[in-house]
Amino acid sequence: MLAFSPVPIEDFEEVFQLTKLGLHDFVDAVFGWDDDMQRQRIRDEYEWRWMHWVTLRDNRIGLVCFKPYARALHIHLLLLYPQWQRQGLGSQIMTKFHAQAALEQRDITLSAFRINTAAVALYRKLGYLVESEEPDFLLFRRSCK
C-alpha cells in the first residue's frame, strides 16, 4: 500500500539527488541546470513540511511535495525513482491526492514543463485541464469536489 511520510531534513541531499534525477533534463533545456542554484531553490521555495517520501511496502519509491491552500492542494513535485516509473504508481499517487482533496472539498493544482510529455499525458489522462499556459509550462487544475 502506498503511504506518505514526512521527509527529515537530514535527507536533504537525497531529495536534491532525486530532484536532479527527475528534473535535470527539463530544467537544463529551459533554464540551464546549476547544482548550487537548484539546491538553493529547494531551500528557498519549499517549506520542508511539504515534503513527503512515498513508500510502497516499506520501499522508498519517490517524493511528493505539496502545499494545502484554502481551496486547492498544490502539488509542487511528484518524483519517482526510475525503477518505479512506468508501473502506474504515479496514477495511484494522484488517486490518493484526489480522494483527500475530495474529502476536503479542494481542487488540485500543479504545473508541468511543456517538454515533459509523459507528465503532461498523465495529467490529461487523469482529467486535469489546462488552466493557463506559459512559454515553458502548463498550469493544470482538477476539481475533486
Image (cartoon, rainbow, N blue to C red):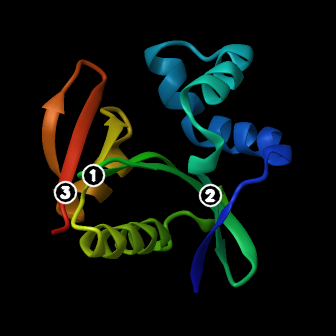
Q: Circle 1 — which element?
A: strand
Q: Which mark is residue 52?
A: 2
Direction from residue 8 to residue 108 in the image, left or right: left
Mark 3 or 2 closer to N-term? 2
Q: Residues within 10 Å of mark 3 (few under 14, many from 20)?
A: many
Q: CA distance from mark 2 to mark 1?
A: 18 Å
Q: Mark 1 or mark 3: which is in front?
A: 1
**Placement of the C terminus among the 4 image quadrants:** bottom left
**Residue 18 is drawn in which quadrant?**
top right
According to the picture, the residue beneath numbered tag 1 turns out to be: 72
Q: CA distance from mark 3 to mark 2?
A: 21 Å
- Vertical position of residue 15 compared to residue 26: above or below: below
Mark 1 is on which residue type?
A: Ala
The answer to whether the residues at label 2 and label 1 have Cβ atoms under 8 Å apart is no
Residue drawn at (19%, 57%) of the image: 142
Direction from residue 96 to residue 71 in the image, left or right: left
Residue drawn at (59%, 30%) of the image: 24
Mark 2 or 1 closer to N-term? 2
Q: Residues within 10 Å of mark 1 (few under 14, many from 20)?
A: many
Q: Circle 2 — which element?
A: strand
According to the picture, the residue beneath numbered tag 3 turns out to be: 142
**Residue 105 is drawn in which quadrant?**
bottom left
Mark 3 is on which residue type?
A: Arg
Direction from residue 79 to residue 101 in the image, left or right: left
Q: Mark 2 or mark 1: which is in front?
A: 1
